[in-house]
Image (tube, rainbow, N blue to C red):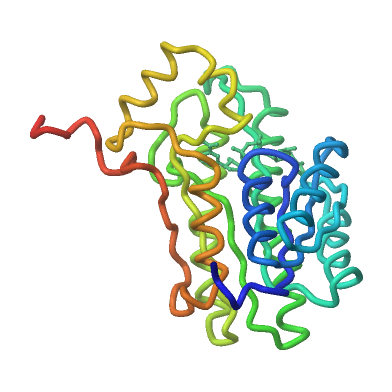
Amino acid sequence: MYTDLKGKVVAITGASSGLGKAMALRFGQEQAKVVINYFNNEKDAQSVKEEVQKAGGEAVAVQGDVTKEEDVKNIVQTAVKEFGTLDIMINNAGVENPVPSHEMPLNDWNKVISTNLTGAFLGSREAIKYYVENNIKGNVINMSSVHEMIPWPLFVHYAASKGGIKLMTETLALEYAPKGIRVNNIGPGAINTPINAEKFADPVQKKDVESMIPMGYIGEPEEIAAVAVWLASKESSYVTGITLFADGGMTKYPSFQAGRG
Ligand code: NAI
């Protein structure tokens, strides 16, 4: 538990499922006030809201498409209207789909870039604008991926979006450090969420992914939520501009394990 998170206001995009949901619940356990943004699944968002409240936090659900400027503004405004301020913005919404790069329709490229990268930019910009105007030493956390450093054939749009998030976060961290605003990334490896449901339902594909993880197992959403609360808390007060990989060692060249190479 991080006692300084009690009563803090956190907005999380894409929070009706997967990592966003796990982070919302963990912030609820920390007795924070959580703005749960959802895209199209109101029922799931309502049930996350109830779970956050049951865990000891306060919560509100707000629909919004992170690719739309007005919707992202509304997420920050909802935090202020409902809970009086914003302390932590978590830009988590993301999408992916596999397509050979030479056949990738422009629509697929645009959808992934606008959701993962532009969405994170808009969320960062709106949160930082609020922090600057109100003299708040706020916090921004962007959901990157191991694919901000590992190239990913068939997912050129996704890898480009996460690579973009890396330098966006580093740039914002540098720009706003003098104001005490911290901006960091989380870089998950392979985690058991709906984005991977189809892949991990197939035992062959699941085993193949596990073979790329030195720790030997697929991570659980709670293991990412634990990173998020640390980055949001005072315990990480001197940390800005990093990507904290939580990937069971996936970024450490697993093919070289056991002295190969
Ligand atoms: P997920 O599919 O459960 O979550 C993605 C969420 O984003 C969904 O709730 C979806 O409704 C929402 N979303 C999609 N488009 C949106 C839009 N335009 N506006 C608002 N919300 C939108 O999958 P997961 O795993 O929880 O993904 C969360 C983030 O974590 C993504 O950014 C993903 O790239 C990242 N990530 C996930 C990894 C994994 O293995 N699960 C690994 C590395 C990164």
- Residue 172 shows up from this direction: no
Residue 169, position as x, y percentages in the image? 54, 62
Q: Quadrant of residue 218?
A: top left
Position of residue 44 relative to residue 83, above or below, is: above
Front residue of this view, candidates 66 and 248: 248
Q: Quadrant of the N terminus?
A: bottom right
Please give the count of numbered marks on the rendered protein: 0
Residue 59, position as x, y percentages in the image? 81, 59
Q: Quadrant of residue 10?
A: bottom right
Residue 28 is left or right of residue 207, and the answer is: right
Residue 47, position as x, y percentages in the image? 81, 42
Q: Residue at x 25, y 38 (%)?
A: 253
Q: Residue at x 57, y 51 (%)?
A: 143
Q: Residue at x 61, y 44 (%)?
A: 19
Position of residue 25 relative to residue 216, above or below, is: below
Residue 150 is left or right of residue 1, and the answer is: left
Q: Quadrant of the C terminus?
A: top left
Residue 168 is left or right of residue 122, and the answer is: left
Residue 103, position as x, y percentages in the image? 58, 17
Q: Residue at x 67, y 52 (%)?
A: 25
Position of residue 137 relative to residue 57, above or below, is: below
Q: Quadrant of residue 35?
A: bottom right
Query: In which of the image's four quarters is ligand 1 placed?
Result: top right
Residue extending furthest toward the right: 81
Front residue of this view, candidates 47 and 66: 47
Front residue of this view, candidates 131 and 229: 229
- Residue 180 shows up from this direction: yes
Front residue of this view, candidates 226 and 14: 226
